[in-house]
Amino acid sequence: MKDNDSAIATVGIAVSTPDTGDTGTAKTAAAKGLGTPKAAATTPGTPKATTAPATHVGRGVLLAALGVAAFSLTFPATAWGLEGMGPWTVVMLRSVLATVPAGAALLALRVRPPERRHWAGIAVVAGGVVLGFPLLTTLALETSTTSHAAVVVGLLPLTTAACSAVRTGARPSRTFWIASLVGAVVVIGFAVQQSGGVPNRSDLLLFAALLVCAAGYTEGGRLARHMPGWQVIGWALVLALPVTVAGAALALSAEPLELTARSVAGVLWLAVGSQFLGMVAWYRGMAVIGISRASQLQLAQPLLTLLWSVLLLGERLPPAAPAAALAVLVCIAVTQRTRG
């Protein structure tokens, strides 16, 4: 992560991109040589903002890609967890366990609580990526395969970009949208073809998860311009802790529990990899390269999920996978070279 990602860092992550909702202020500050609005640079407990050069943009792309790689293991890890636990137990335990390293870091570094104006956005992150998306996708995976669940991931970049445009006033270029649509069509067509594509209850749950996750990603990317990415997800986990602790207690008493090596490993990865470390890298990357452009890296996530499904769950990879992967990589290259 950029030079430092702690509350005492002196080098910040905030950059001016088309995704920010403070465009006018950012431009004024940039004209004075400040790079970003004064408020963002002087908020107690947050890093000072600087304009990111090309090398930092490349690092932002790498961080966002690492987040996508972590997220690609979410569905296979959920399937492992469901082998020995109920869906509510998996969801609540992953969040409670993820709060342990997040809360410990916040306490150890004596991070001040966010300003009052940021708590509404943190609540959206908590509802979207801490509770909503994990719960809806886990319930869907009770009756759906991981490959079929990849459909929602194929649509997530477009939904996130659209949500970002509405929330922040961003206006990506026509080429950006065309490449995004083509990539999404390729991913969705590939996933639907190999899974049958018959709409059912799990599809409704997945599409609902798509909407709440896009909202959480958008707010998280916006907040990561004002505080380090790990603090965004850390405070979201802390905010949701009363709900997740009570939910875990109820779920453990109501659902069957059979701990196996795979179920334990699955929940541990969901907590540490997907829920915390993956989010840290993802929000930090979005803060550098912008929400819309970062979201397009997720076009590769369904194909990565299918690969992990073969290696970890024993599913057979369809012959069309290499061609689909190449098409997705081309679309990602186009979106990354396009400026909104």
Image (cartoon, rainbow, N blue to C red):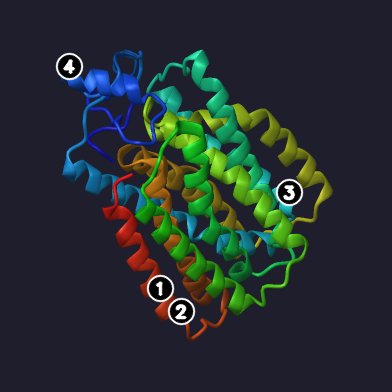
Residue 310: x and y in percent read: 52, 77
Q: Residue at x 35, y 26 (%)?
A: 23
Tell us which disc is closer to us: 2 or 4.
4
Q: Tell me which corner region of the image, top left, top right, bottom left or bottom right, holds residue 26.
A: top left
Element carrying mark 1:
helix
Q: Earlier in the sequence, mark 2 or mark 3?
A: 3
Above/below status of 149 relative to 96: below
Q: CA distance from mark 1 to mark 4?
A: 44 Å
Q: Residues within 10 Å of mark 3 (few under 14, many from 20)?
A: many
Given the image, on which type of amino acid does mark 4 rest? Lys
Residue at coordinates 70% horizontally, 32% vertically from top-left?
Answer: 243
Image quadrant of residue 97?
top right
In terms of depth relative to the viewer, which is nearer, 328 or 312? 328
**Residue type (three-letter) at the residue carrying disc 1:** Ala
Q: Amino acid at mark 3?
A: Trp
**Label 2 vs 4, first from the N-terminus:** 4
* Residue at the right extreme, as displayed: 254
Image marks 2 and 4: residues in contact by CB distance under 8 Å: no
Of the two numbered discs 1 and 4 in the rendering, the one whose residue sits closer to the viewer = 4
Give SS at disc 4. loop
Q: Nearer the viewer, residue 159 or 280?
A: 159
User: How far, Cα to Cα, is label 2 from label 1?
Assistant: 6 Å
- Check disc 2 and report the residue beneath it: 321
Image height of 301 relative to 60, above or below = below
Residue where numbered disc 1 is placed: 325
- Tag 3's secondary structure? helix
The answer to whether marks 2 and 1 mark residues whose Cβ atoms lie closer than 8 Å is yes
Residue 32's disc number = 4
Tell me, for residue 88, which label it has, or none.
3
Of pointers 1 and 4, the one earlier in the residue sequence:
4
Q: Nearer the viewer, mark 2 or mark 3?
A: 2
Q: Quadrant of residue 326?
A: bottom left
